[in-house]
Amino acid sequence: MIKRKILAELEKELLSDKVIVLTGMRRVGKTTLVRYLYDQLSTGRKLFLDLENPLNQAYFQEVDYEKIKLYFERLAVGRGEKLTIFLDEIQNVKNLPSVVKYLYDHYQIKFVLTGSASFYLKNLFSESLAGRKRVFELFPLDFEEFLSYKAPNLKKPNLDEEITKPIFLLFDKYFWEYLTYGGFPSVVLKNSHEEKIAEIEDIFTSYFQKEIQLLSDFRKIEAMRTTVLLLPLRVGSKIDLTKISSELGISRITLVEYLSFLEGTYFINRVRPYSQSLDISLRGMAKLYWGDNGFLTKTGTLPAILLENLVFNLLRQKGEVFFYQSKGGAEIDFLVKKENRLLAFEVKSQAHPSDVNKLEKLCRKLKLSKFFVVSQGFKPMPHVVYSFQL
């Protein structure tokens, strides 16, 4: 198992009384993590159910929740009063939130839940378990997790450490693989190009069959498929809903519904323009990014766009991400908002001092305390951090 950064938090939360909800894209390793937690749990009784199995789904068809409790107690292993139930892929059981709430409220049963549809998990559990749950999001491997498997003895440089060319070259070959094939654990574990491509295609097929066809209520699956295949051409670009809906021959409302579903299952992400006015930000055209670079491997996406997509996926784990465009057209690729602080990131295949200067001027106008130019190619440049009175 590739050790995930989130594991320590999950292990700590496993000792609490709250319901744990682990969500994320299909095949990012949710099941592996919760099975590990299940195996490590040595106190009380425990039960693991895979809810993609129709036999396990049948337990929740009982109208009497007391009978469901009896089923679980008979199936559980171990000794002790405390019962911990692990339920994997819960989006397959529609009445599950009410069952969990009943058993949690009446019998203090601990639940660990996983699912791949964030809109389902967040909406259905928002009121029924308010204040009694902890939601975790699991993403594909970040570069540090990737290196922990590929090069476990390679020490990551500190942010303020000068990067010399020999240090750069140590990481470059690994970064190219990560940039090209993405961070799905099962893809990272494969060795050859052919094996990695086959695994990515299998993940894509699994997503389409198990998310779109089973979870959605879209009547025209073919239109949805065409939408998905068109989206790689829009990576890093603003989404013109009217133009795209016209190309697809569907209504604008239908396209919005499709995009919301794809985003709610972590397949794509929409990044909105930054504005101090929430209304202006919501009305502005969003940019599109994919949930993992592996999906873009066979689409002919330019390396510069692959890099931008990758940087977005790393930044979204750090806070809320926006892009910025001034009235004059000057842009900043990403602004990351975390705890009322904004950090600016400009992404370049090969950065130059002029890129630093341009970003500095924009950040001065926005009164940002820190900014970074991300360069894929090696370029010795001064480490510049400007501070302002905010």
Image (cartoon, rainbow, N blue to C red):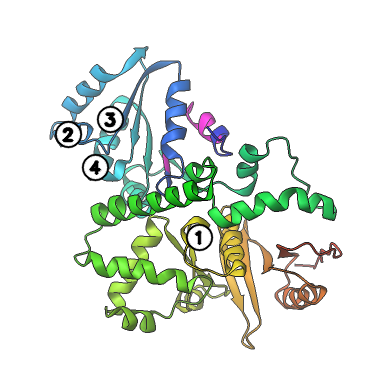
CA separation in Å, label 1 and label 2: 39 Å
Q: Are marks 4 and 2 in contact (CB under 8 Å)?
A: no
CA separation in Å, label 1 and label 4: 34 Å
Q: Nearer the viewer, residue 115 or 124?
A: 115
**Among numbered discs 1 and 4, the one appearing first in the sequence:** 4
CA separation in Å, label 3 and label 2: 17 Å
Residue at the spot x=58%, y=59% of the render? 310
Identify whether 78 is placed above or below 55.
above
Q: Secondary structure at mark 2?
A: helix
Three-letter code for the amino acid on which mark 2 is drawn: Ala
Identify whether 210 is placed above or below 382.
above
Residue at the spot x=66%, y=53% of the render? 175
Quarter of the picture holding the C terminus = bottom right
- The residue that label 1 is drawn on is 297
Identify whether 259 is placed above or below 144.
below
Three-letter code for the amino acid on which mark 4 is drawn: Val
- The residue that label 2 is drawn on is 58
CA separation in Å, label 3 and label 1: 45 Å
Label 1 vs label 2, nearer the camera:
1
Q: Quadrant of residue 366?
A: bottom right
**Furthest residue in direction top, as rendered:** 79
Callout 4: few (<14), some (14-19), or many (20+) C-alpha neighbours within 10 Å?
Answer: some
Q: Are marks 3 and 2 in contact (CB under 8 Å)?
A: no
- The residue that label 4 is drawn on is 93
Q: Are marks 3 and 1 in contact (CB under 8 Å)?
A: no
Q: Is residue 18 magenta?
A: yes
Q: Secondary structure at mark 1?
A: loop
**Among numbered discs 4 and 2, the one appearing first in the sequence:** 2
Label 1 vs label 4, nearer the camera:
1
**Furthest residue in direction left, as rendered:** 63
Three-letter code for the amino acid on which mark 1 is drawn: Thr
Q: Are marks 1 and 2 in contact (CB under 8 Å)?
A: no
